[in-house]
Image (cartoon, helix red, strand yellow):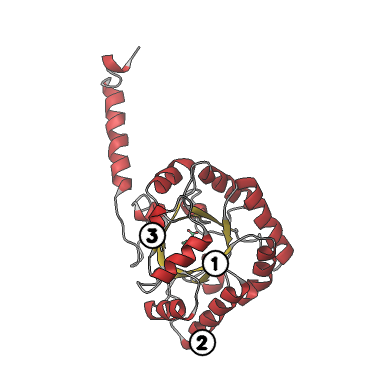
C-alpha cells in the first residue's frame, strides 16, 4: 500500500487505508482561502472547516452563534484553494439537532454550495437518525465524541470528559453506533488517552484526537492555536509551533514606525 503523500486526492477511503497500515492522519482547521492554500500545499491530509471559526474568526466565546450561511462562506473560500486534502465541514449548532430532515438539508446545502467533501456532527446516539439520513444521500459523515463544544452549556465546563466509568462506557457505545451507521472517522476530543486508545482498537474506522493522547489514528488542532495567533487558550494538549501573534504585532509596529517617519515608501517603492 502506498503512503498517503503519494495520492493526488485524499478520500475517506485513503483515510481507512492509513489506519490499516498505521500511518497517522494529520488534520488542521482552516476557514479561508489563503491559509487553506498553505495547508494543502504542505500536504495536510484533512482540512476541517470547524465551527471553531465562531471563536477564532468571529470572536464569539463559544461555537454556538455561527450560522449555516457563515459556515458555507468559510467552506467555499477553503474549497477555492484546496486540490489534495479531504475537506470536512462542521454542521453548526442548530442546523441538525433534533430534526434529521433539517440535518440532511443543512448537509446538502454545505455540499452543493461549497463543494466540500464531507460533514462533521457532534454527538452519539442522539444524532444517529440524522447521521443515517445524511449518509443515505451519499454524504460522508465524520463523528465527534468526548468534549463536544456545542454542548458546553450542558457540560458547564471545558474539563476532560469521560473520566468516570459511566460516561466512558457511553462513549464506547456511541463510537460503535457511529461506526455501524457508516461514519468514516470519529474525532475524540479531550478524553483520557487510555480510553481513546481503547476506542481506536475497538472500531475499524480512524479516530482523530485532540487532547486524546497518542493512541489514536491521527491528530487535529485549531490552526490559530497551533500557530500562536490566539493567545487566550492554553490547554495542556496544545503544542504551539509558532508565536505568530508577537510576529504580526512586531511587523505592524515596524510598519507604523516607517509610515510615521516617512521611511515608507522609499524611492524604489514608488512610480
Ligand atoms: O471546530 C473545530 O475546530 C473542531 C475541532 C476542535 C475538532 O471541531
Q: Which mark is residue 184?
A: 1
- Residue 157 location, x and y as percent? 47, 71
**Can the viewer see residue 209?**
no
- Nearest-to-viewer mark from 1 and 2: 1
Label whose residue precedes the other's in the sequence (1 or 3):
3
Q: Is residue 79 above or below residue 176?
A: above
Q: CA distance from mark 1 to mark 3?
A: 19 Å
Name which quarter of the figure residue 134 lies in.
bottom right
Label whose residue precedes the other's in the sequence (1 or 2):
2
Q: Is residue 193 above or below residue 122?
A: below
- Residue 145 location, x and y as percent? 52, 72
Outermost residue, front direction? 1
Q: CA distance from mark 3 to mark 2?
A: 38 Å
Name which quarter of the figure residue 18 lies in.
bottom left
**Label 2 SS:** helix
Q: In the visual, does 223 lie left or right of 114?
A: left
Residue occupied by mark 2: 166
- Nearest-to-viewer mark from 1 and 3: 3
- Residue 245 location, x and y as percent? 33, 47
| Label 1, residues with CA under 10 Å away: few <14, some 14-19, many ≥20 | many
Q: CA distance from mark 1 to mark 2?
A: 25 Å
| Label 2, residues with CA under 10 Å away: few <14, some 14-19, many ≥20 | few
Outermost residue, bottom direction? 165
**Can the viewer see residue 165?**
yes
Residue occupied by mark 3: 3
**Could you tell me which residue is drawn at 48 percent across and 83 percent down?**
168
Q: Is mark 3 within 8 Å of ligand 1?
A: no
Check the picture and name the quadrant holding the N terminus: bottom left
Label whose residue precedes the other's in the sequence (3 or 2):
3
Circles 3 and 2: CB distance less than 8 Å?
Answer: no
Amino acid at each position: 500500500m502506498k503512503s498517503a503523500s503519494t495520492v493526488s486526492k485524499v478520500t475517506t477511503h485513503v483515510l481507512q487505508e492509513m489506519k490499516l497500515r498505521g500511518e497517522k492522519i494529520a488534520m488542521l482547521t482552516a476557514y479561508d482561502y489563503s491559509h487553506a492554500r498553505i495547508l494543502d500545499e504542505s500536504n495536510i491530509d484533512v482540512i476541517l472547516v470547524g465551527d471553531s471559526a465562531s471563536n477564532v474568526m468571529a470572536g464569539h466565546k463559544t461555537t454556538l452563534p455561527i450560522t449555516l450561511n457563515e459556515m458555507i462562506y468559510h467552506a467555499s473560500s477553503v474549497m477555492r484553494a484546496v486540490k489534495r486534502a479531504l475537506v470536512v465541514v462542521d454542521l453548526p449548532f442548530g442546523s441538525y439537532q433534533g430534526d434529521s430532515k433539517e440535518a440532511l438539508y443543512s448537509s446538502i446545502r454545505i455540499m452543493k454550495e461549497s463543494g466540500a467533501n464531507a460533514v462533521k456532527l457532534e454527538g452519539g446516539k442522539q444524532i444517529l437518525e440524522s447521521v443515517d439520513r445524511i449518509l443515505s444521500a451519499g454524504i460522508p459523515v465524520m463523528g465527534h465524541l468526548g468534549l463536544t463544544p456545542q454542548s458546553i452549556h450542558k457540560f458547564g465546563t471545558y474539563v476532560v470528559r469521560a473520566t468516570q466509568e459511566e460516561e466512558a462506557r457511553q462513549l464506547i457505545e456511541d463510537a460503535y453506533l457511529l461506526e455501524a451507521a457508516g461514519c468514516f472517522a470519529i474525532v475524540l476530543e479531550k478524553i483520557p488517552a487510555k480510553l481513546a486508545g481503547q476506542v481506536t482498537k475497538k472500531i475499524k474506522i480512524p479516530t482523530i484526537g485532540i487532547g486524546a493522547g497518542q493512541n489514536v489514528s491521527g491528530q487535529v488542532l485549531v490552526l490559530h492555536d497551533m500557530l500562536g495567533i490566539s493567545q487566550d487558550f492554553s490547554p495542556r494538549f496544545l503544542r504551539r509551533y509558532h508565536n505568530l501573534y508577537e510576529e504580526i504585532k512586531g511587523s505592524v509596529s515596524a510598519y507604523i514606525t516607517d509610515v510615521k517617519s516617512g521611511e515608507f515608501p522609499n524611492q524604489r517603492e514608488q512610480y
